Image (cartoon, rainbow, N blue to C red):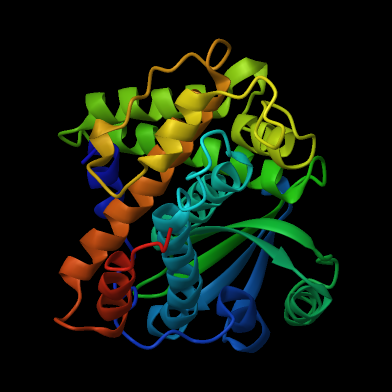
């Protein structure tokens, strides 16, 4: 297991998945939960304060579990269509979503989220905020949320509006890139035992995310678009300029030790191999966290049963 996975596991939220998840997740909690609002205009963020952790966690658990399970399902079945020697289009898309969902799960498990607030959620926050500051006006859009320790035993939820530039996937990967950098800094400042290894592993993943000059972190999304929407890289019939080594890689994708995945493919020379290995690695980090969480929960807990049942599934080729 990567040292990065161990550092992330130490940051899993307390009580995550210990109780039955609450449907529709964090957005539902915003519509029904108890909090008051403190604006921080200089930071361009909103704080939902005095949040009771036991009330919030079941909603966070819902979001975490849906991402974690969909990531592993995508990972397990991404190679099920590679029986055709050159077919890579749909297998590559599945592997990408294994990483995309896995990265979401990693962030949710540790108290971070990239989420879309619709009109109803924005209106409720604005309504509550007006009791304290009538100038606060929240609008629908994509936000980065982060749980912060509040006073005594309470939790604050910080919401920061993301710029509308780029698509939803690019927005997310930019946030994940920054999330990894902040994690490495936090591990180093805390003098944690794996600080040096975490810094190196984080840098390697960030290098993949920002390959081909796509700083800060949208390269996987860019290659996914090239494969899925532009039909590049010979991934679709008639497979012109296809890369059988990438097809072979996806056909052998499995759940295994995350530290065994190569992180040194050259994205300029071998873009498909770098793409496949990068997606595989991020998905496996999500698997590491899910497996660690199952070890913390009571035996035969609901999430553990779902997790183990899915891991036993095998594709029908």
- Nearest the viewer among 258 and 63 is 258
> Compared with residue 3, is residue 233 higher up or lower down, i.e. above or below?
above
Name the residue located 43 percent from the left edge and 84 percent from the top edge.
21
Q: Quadrant of residue 219?
A: top right
Coordinates of residue 228 in the picture (x, y in percent): 72, 42
Count of labels in the image: 0
- Residue 301 visible to an observer of this rendering: yes
Q: Quadrant of the C terminus?
A: bottom left
- Residue 181 visible to an observer of this rendering: no
Name the residue located 48 percent from the left edge and 13 percent from the top edge.
266
Coordinates of residue 139 in the picture (x, y in percent): 84, 65
> Compared with residue 62, is residue 287 higher up or lower down, i.e. above or below?
above
Coordinates of residue 236 in the picture (x, y in percent): 69, 37
Name the residue located 20 percent from the left edge and 33 percent from the top edge.
191
Coordinates of residue 6 in the picture (x, y in percent): 22, 45
> Compared with residue 199, is residue 21 higher up or lower down, i.e. above or below?
below
Name the residue located 41 percent from the left edge and 41 percent from the top edge.
251
Q: Quadrant of residue 297?
A: bottom left
- Nearest the viewer among 85 and 298 is 85
Residue at far top of view: 269
Q: In the visual, does 253 lie left or right of 116?
A: left
- Nearest the viewer among 73 and 298 is 73
């Amino acid at each position: 297991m990567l040292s990065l996975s161990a550092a992330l596991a130490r940051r899993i939220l307390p009580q995550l998945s210990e109780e039955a998840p609450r449907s529709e997740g964090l957005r539902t909690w915003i519509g029904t939960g108890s909090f008051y609002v403190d604006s921080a205009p200089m930071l361009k963020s909103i704080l939902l304060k005095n949040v009771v952790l036991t009330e919030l966690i079941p909603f966070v658990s819902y979001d975490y579990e849906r991402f974690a399970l969909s990531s592993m399902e995508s990972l397990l079945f991404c190679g099920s269509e590679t029986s055709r020697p050159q077919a890579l289009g749909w297998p590559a898309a599945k592997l990408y979503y294994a990483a995309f969902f896995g990265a979401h799960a990693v962030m949710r498990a540790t108290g971070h989220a990239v989420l879309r607030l619709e009109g109803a959620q924005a209106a409720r926050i604005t309504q509550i905020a007006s009791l304290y500051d009538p100038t606060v006006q929240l609008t629908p859009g994509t936000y980065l949320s982060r749980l912060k320790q509040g006073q005594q035993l309470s939790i604050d939820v910080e919401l920061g509006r993301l710029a509308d530039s780029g698509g939803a996937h690019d927005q997310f990967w930019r946030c994940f890139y920054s999330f990894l950098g902040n994690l490495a800094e936090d591990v180093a400042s805390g003098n944690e035992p794996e600080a040096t290894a975490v810094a190196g592993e984080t840098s390697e993943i960030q290098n993949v995310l920002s390959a081909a000059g796509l700083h800060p972190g949208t390269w996987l999304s860019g290659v996914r678009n090239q494969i899925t929407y532009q039909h590049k890289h010979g991934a679709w019939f008639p497979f012109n300029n296809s890369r059988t080594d990438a097809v072979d890689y996806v056909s052998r994708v499995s759940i295994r030790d995350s530290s065994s995945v190569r992180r040194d493919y050259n994205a300029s020379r071998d873009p498909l191999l770098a793409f496949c290995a990068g997606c595989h690695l991020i998905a496996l980090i999500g698997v590491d966290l899910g497996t660690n969480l199952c070890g913390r929960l009571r035996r035969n807990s609901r999430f553990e049963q779902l997790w183990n049942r899915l891991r036993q599934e095998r594709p029908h080729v």
